[in-house]
Amino acid sequence: MTSFVVYVDESGDEGFAFRSDGSGSSRWFVMSALVLRKANDSQAVAVARDIRQLLSKPVNHALHFRNLRHEQRIPVARLIGQMPARTVSILIHKPSIEEPEIFQQQAYALCRYASRLLLERVSWLCRDNRKTDDGDGRAELVFSNRSAMSYDDLRQYLTGLKQEREGRDVRIDWNAIDPARVRAVNHDQLAGLQLADAVATSAYYSVTVNRYGDVEDRYLRSISPTIYRRDGRVEGYGLKFWCSSRDLIDRVIAVVA
């Protein structure tokens, strides 16, 4: 039996059509994971239920963080921040990518690369928190289903990484990650995916400038108790950036410190 369950969702798009007026593709692509011990998986259902009750939503309502009003997002993020869970987010500033054509030649290449970075950190988290009497130490990996994306391709990509065909600087701990245990489920079917969506969107809002030149980092601050830290360090672990602006990275790290 697996020891952990990992719910994965993203925010932003993978395009590179940036316009001077701020329109076009999103400047950021964020992928986040909500990691629970398998024994605590029911907590995701309980928290989603509490959120629906708080927002006066029907019991079968599928939560989409982006569709909520600001005053609703604040308590939702607070409830997630109180969960017995850990979160990991990969934040990619696409204009900082010096060779974007690498990710434009094949559909979902950026998503697959973000998955690699995410699963590296998830694997370290699982490895360092394994209990000898609690499953096999591995994680069940549940991605929010994108209808046009092939998750067979993602499994094959991860298998290639495991066999070192895709590069030698792969730091996934394969004792925790099994490519065969990747599956995709529709967002509305699992509470854990709806909460992972809130985590990814919260991270996205913390770095994305709105039309007035501001970012909204209060959601990420509320979720910050769950962010994966190693020896007290969050950068490179619970928050992994690909961004050329050191000042921006430092600002976000200060929010969750």
Image (cartoon, rainbow, N blue to C red):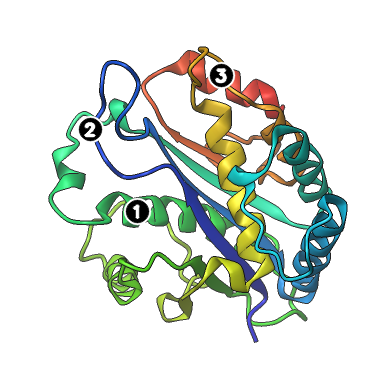
Mark 1 vs mark 2: in front? 2
* Mark 2 / mark 3, whichever is N-terminal: 2
Toward the viewer: 249 or 56?
56
Q: Is residue 127 above or below residue 101?
A: below
Mark 1 vs mark 3: in front? 1
Q: State the image coordinates of residue 21 (x, y, percent, origin top left).
A: 31, 16
Residue linked to disc 1: 111
Q: Amino acid at mark 2?
A: Ala
Label 1 vs label 2: CA separation? 17 Å
Q: State the image coordinates of residue 43 (x, y, percent, origin top left).
A: 81, 67
Looking at the rendered structure, which numbered label has been put on residue 3? none
Residue at 61% across / 45% down in the picture? 67
Q: From this viewpoint, which residue is outermost toward the bottom?
A: 1
* Mark 1 / mark 3, whichever is N-terminal: 1
Residue at 65% across / 87% down in the picture? 1
Residue linked to disc 3: 250
Residue linked to disc 2: 17
Q: Is residue 196 visible?
A: yes
Q: Residues within 10 Å of mark 3 (few under 14, many from 20)?
A: few
Q: In terms of secondary structure, where does tag 2 sit? A: loop
